Image (cartoon, rainbow, N blue to C red):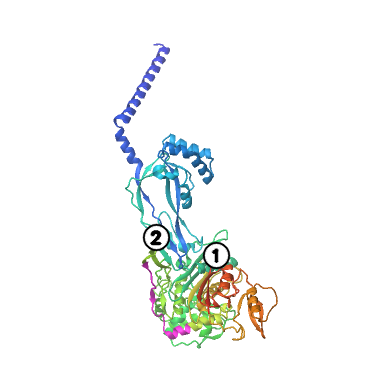
Amino acid sequence: MNIKKSILLRVRIAFLLVTLFAVAIVVKVGKIQFAEGDRWQQIADQTNVKYMTVKATRGNIYSDNGSLLATSLPFYKVAFDATIASDEVFNQGIDSLALLLSRYFKDQSQEGYKRKLKNARATGRQYIVINREQVGYQGKKQMSTWPIFRHGRLGGGVIFHKVDKRFRPFSNLSRRTIGFVNENNRGAGLEYSFNDKLAGKDGEALYQKMAGGSWKPVFDGSEVKTENGFDIETTIDINLQDVSETALLKALEYHEADYGVVAVMEVSTGEIKAISNLSRNSNGYYYERYNYAVGGLREPGSTFKLATMIALLEDTNMNLGDSVDTGNGKYKFYDNTVTDHEEGGYGTITVREAFEKSSNVAMAKLVDKYFGLKPERFLQYIDNLELSKPLGLQIKGEGIPKIKRPTDKDWSGITLPWMAYGYGLELTPLQSLALYNAVANNGKMIKPIIVKKVRRADKVLEEYNTVVLNGKICSNETLAKVRVMLEGVVDRGTANNIKNSHYKIAGKTGTAQILENGRYTKRYITSFAGYFPADNPRYSAIVLIKNPKGWRQYGSNVAAPVFKEIADNIYSRDIDMHRPMAKEYVAEAGVFPVIRSGNHEDLQFICNELSISNHSEGDQDWVTTELFGNAIKWKDNKVDPQFVPDVTGMTLRDAIYVLESCGLRVSIRGTGRVSRQSQQPGTRALKGSEIKIELG
C-alpha cells in the first residue's frame, strides 16, 4: 500500500467516526427532548424554583415627642413580564411608555427603551429589570398610571419588588445610640438591642430563576405573609439632643480632643434625654463611632471623690469643718507620691474645702486614716452605691466596672489611697451619672432608661417603668453634707467659672491622667458631673472629653463649660425652672389703660384715639412702654430672628407673630397678655424649638 492510499484510508476512518458521533448526539437529543422531555422539565422546574425569605418591614424608633429617629422607607425595583400584555395594549402603549421611562430615569433614549421592551416581547422574556435604579413610593404611584403599566401585574406585566431602606430623618444625630443591624444580625445601639421587637417576622414566597440569574416571584397563593415589626418610643428629647451634640462638638473642635461624651438624665425618672458620643477620625472630623457613655470604661478621676466622701461621712463622725493637713501638695505613700494640682499645696484646710478644691492629698490621707486597716469596709460602701456591677441598661454592650479587691494579686498598699481620688478603678460615664443623679434624687438611685414603650400603632404592648437600684444610698445627714459640697464646687471651688445668678449648679470636676503601657502620661480625661437647679434638681448630666490639646486640660475649663451651655439651654426652655420675677410697674390703675408691649403703630393709634400723650425717640416696629409723668414713652423692643425676642406684655396675636417669625414653636397657657416666657430673651433662637408662654 502506497502512502497516498494510506492517508486516504485514515481520512475515511476519521470521517466515519465523526459521522457516527454526530448521529449519536442527534439520537440522544431526540431521546431527551421527546422520550424523556417531561421528566427533565420537571427536574428543571424543581431546580429553578425555590422558596425565598421575604423581609418584614422594620418598626420605627421615636423620640419622646413622637419625632421619628429611624424608620423604614419603601423603595421599589421595577421589572416587567413582556409576555403578559395583550398585543393591543402593548402596541398602543409602547411608544408613550418608552418616552416616560426615558424621561424618568434619564439614562436611555426613548428608542433605547422601546427596543429593549420590544426585544423582550419578541423573545418571550418573562422577567426583565427595567432599570437598576430603585424608585420611591411616589415614583411607584406615578408609574402605575403609565400606559401598559396601568393594567397592573396581571394585565400589563409590571412587577414592583418592594425593598425597605432604613432612614434617619435627623441624619447623624444620636447615630450610635440609635445604632444598626447588619445582614448577619449583628450590630449596636437600640436597633440591635431591641432587634427582636423591631424586626418583626419574615415571610416566604416562591421565586423562579430567570435567564441572567435574576429571580421572579411566582404568585401561586402559597406565600407566607410578613408581620411588620413593633415600634419603640425612646426618652430622647430631639431638641436637647441637638443642643448637647452641638455644644460637645464645639468643645471638641476647639480643644482638638480625641473624643467626647455627653449624657443628660431626668432626675426623678432616670430618663436619658440626650446622649452623644463623638470621636475624631484620621481626617480630623468628629462622628459617632462608639457608645462610650454605655461601654467606655475609664478611670473617673476626681468625680469619684463623691463616692469617697459618702463612705467617709457614713462610717465616721467627721464633720465638714474638720481640718486636714495637705502640706505642700505632695504626700508619699511607700514609694509613690500623691500630688495636688495647686502648686505649693493648700496647707491646712477643712474637709469641705478639700472637696471643693479637689485635693488628692486630702482624699488619700482621709481614706488611708479611716479605712487603711479595713479596706473591705470602704469597698462595701462602693458596692452599696452600685458602682461595682453593671447597671443593666437597655442597650447591649455595657461595660463591666473594674474595682480591685484586697484578694487580687495587684492589690498593694497604695491601691486604696489611689482609689480615694478616682485612680486604679474603671467605670462607665453612665455609672458615674447614676451616682450623681441619686444625690439629686434625695438618695434614691434609679437605673437610667432610654426606651419607654413598645407599641404597634397606638396600642402599647410593653411599657418600661423606673427601676430603683437603691432606695437610699446614704443617710439624710450625709446627703445634706455632700449636696453642700457639690454646690460649693461651683460657688467657690474648681468649677466657679460656671457659676451664674439665674440658677444654681451642683457638681464635681474631674481630671484623670491617661494610663498607657502601664505608665501615666501628660494626657488627660477631663470631666464634669452634676445636676441643676441645685435647690430643686430636675436634670443631671455628665460631660467627658479625652485628651484636650493646649494649655487648658482640666475638667473646670474643658468639660464644665459644656455642661453649663447645655444647662443654660434647658433652663431657658423650661419655664417651670424659673424663679418668679417681680412684676414690672407699667401704669397707674385708673389713669392709663393696660399698654405694655406690642406693635408701635397699633399702640400709638390707640393712645391717640384715647387722647393719651405718647412720645418716641425713633421709628420702631416693636416697642415696650414706660410711664413718663402723665404720658407714655415708647422704648424700642428690637426683634432679631437670630435671637429669642421679649414678648412679655404683648397680646397673644402679636406674641405668636413675633415668636413664629423667629422660627419658634409656641405653646400657650392661660388668657390675657403674655406674663412669662420659657426661653430667656436675647438667647440664640433654636429653629423649631418650643417656647412656652403664660398669659395672665
> Which residue bears the numbered disc 2?
198
For residue 598, say whether it is visible: yes
Q: Position of residue 302 (x, y in %)?
A: 51, 76
Residue 320 position (above or below residue 682): below
Q: How many marks?
A: 2
> Which residue bears the numbered disc 1?
258
For the residue pair 408 and 232, the one nearer the viewer reads as 232
On the rendered image, what quadrant is the N terminus found in? top left
Q: Which element is circle 1 on?
A: loop
Please indicate whether residue 684 sits to the left or right of residue 616 in the image. Answer: left
Residue 607: image quadrant is: bottom right
Q: Which element is circle 2 on?
A: helix
Q: Position of residue 88 (x, y in %)?
A: 43, 37
**What residue span does the magenta drawing correspond to?**
462-482
Q: Position of residue 626 (x, y in %)?
A: 64, 81
Q: Is residue 569 magenta?
A: no
Three-letter residue code for mark 2: Leu
Q: Callout 2: few (<14), some (14-19), or many (20+) C-alpha neighbours within 10 Å? A: many
Three-letter residue code for mark 1: Asp
For the residue pair 216 and 265, the one nearer the viewer reads as 216
Which is closer to the viewer, label 2 or label 1? 2
Mark 1 or mark 2, which is nearer the start of the sequence?
2
Residue 227: image quadrant is: bottom left
Q: Is residue 469 magenta?
A: yes
Question: Which mark identifies residue 114?
Answer: none
Q: Callout 1: few (<14), some (14-19), or many (20+) C-alpha neighbours within 10 Å? A: some
